[in-house]
Amino acid sequence: SLGRPRRFSEQFLIEEKHKLNQYRESVRSHYAEVLAGTKEGLPADLAQPLIVGQRVIAIHPKTREIHDGSILTVDHCRYRVQFDHHELGVEFVMVCFLLL
């Protein structure tokens, strides 16, 4: 009744990747509209966008270790983070490497 099973087939992976990319684009467009002020509020399943000055835990792009820091700038899908340890400095961090 459910049809032929497609357990981890190449076609299944292609379709799942396509769905994931569509979801990512829709989330990015929601965030862009909220940041631009053209839309108010986000769906309940999306986190509020990070803002300048917010404290975060981030993976340092060079050491690949987790450290505390503060957001200095916001640029589409990456953030400029000043890490608390001065020797780590300031680095651009992709949004997927940030934790609240």
Image: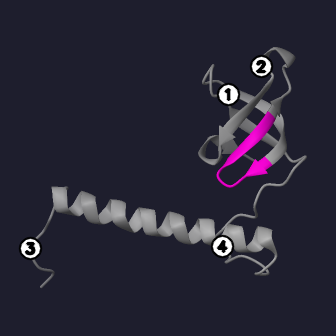
Q: Which residues are magenta?
A: 74-81
Q: Secondary structure at mark 2?
A: helix
Q: Secondary structure at mark 4?
A: helix
Name the residue carrying label 4: 30
- In this view, the residue in front, 53 or 33, is 33
Q: Earlier in the sequence, mark 2 or mark 3?
A: 3
Q: Position of residue 87 (x, y in %)?
A: 81, 14
Name the residue carrying label 1: 60
Name the residue carrying label 3: 4
Do labels 1 and 2 touch, CB within 8 Å?
Answer: yes
The three-letter code of the residue at mark 1 reads His
Q: Earlier in the sequence, mark 4 or mark 1?
A: 4
Label 2 crowd bin: few (<14), some (14–19), many (20+), radius 10 Å? some
Q: Is residue 5 above or below residue 76?
A: below
Q: Secondary structure at mark 3?
A: loop
The three-letter code of the residue at mark 3 reads Arg
- In this view, the residue in front, 86 or 4, is 86
Give yes or no for residue 89 being in the magenta stretch.
Answer: no
